[in-house]
Amino acid sequence: MLYAFSRMIVRSIYRLLFRLEARGVSNIPAAGPVILCSNHKSLQDPFTLGAWVPRKVHYMAKAELFKIPIVAPVIRGWGAFPVKRGGVSKEAIRTAIELLQSGRVMGIFPEGTRNETLGSAKRGAVTIAIRSGAAVVPVALVGEYRLFRKMIAVYGAPIDMRPFAESGTTESMEQATELIMSKIREMLQTGQPSA
């Protein structure tokens, strides 16, 4: 209840300040495990990514953020769980898989760090998707966080990971990662949901 209320507040503020618009929200499956894979340019991205999603979105966040008194309850309320410094641990991956296997939604930024332009991606999102059986929805956050400049959250059609899971090779994982990134790249250019 608190999450739904805070999401409504964030949506209203972002709509006012950044003229935030969402496209392709209907592409997000209404039930079952889902990973939203998005480009990552700002600390505000998790709020932008989840503001229009009708289901609660969970995230990995740096463990240090959970030590900041004001920040910790906010990000925890928005579904974040801590990841230790030095990369994503086995524990964090296990937590993500457990959340997904219980039918939840995860927001993942495959680049692993913030980039002004779309950078190269790591295979972690694909690994988690395959191990959890989650659908992958590519997301493009289009625009800049500048007051009264338009921002668009574009949700593409889900990508079927089963063909890549059947192969299970490093090469197939890289192909799946590149497919996700190519869909994000396409939506960043067009501002429209990918097919």
Image (tube, rainbow, N blue to C red):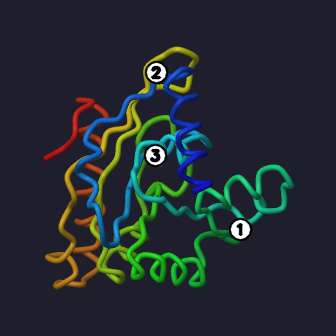
Q: Is residue 90 above or below residue 103?
A: below
Residue positioned 58% across, 39% down in the render: 42
Mark with earlier residue (1, 2): 2
Residue mark closest to the camera, 1 vs 3: 3
Left or right: where does residue 126 sit relative to residue 190? right
Element type at mark 2:
loop
Mark with earlier residue (2, 3): 2
Instruction: Say the numbered circle drawn on residue 19.
Output: 2
Instruction: Say the numbered circle drawn on residue 49.
Output: 3
Left or right: where does residue 33 sit relative to residue 117? left
Q: How far across and how far down the image is residue 2, in percent?
A: 62, 54
Q: For mark 2, does the 10 Å Cα neighbourhood hold few (<14), some (14 to 19), or many (20 or more) residues?
A: some
Query: Toward which corner of the image does residue 14 lie, by quadrant?
Result: top right
Q: For mark 1, does the 10 Å Cα neighbourhood hold few (<14), some (14 to 19), or many (20 or more) residues?
A: few
Query: Toward which corner of the image does residue 132 lie, by quadrant?
Result: bottom left
Quickly name the residue at label 1: 85
Q: Nearer the viewer, residue 47 or 120?
A: 47
Query: Toward which corner of the image does residue 67 lie, by quadrant?
Result: bottom right
Residue type marked 3: Leu
Whether the residues at callouts 1 and 3 have beta carbons within 8 Å, the answer is: no
Q: CA distance from mark 1 to mark 3?
A: 23 Å
Mark with earlier residue (1, 3): 3
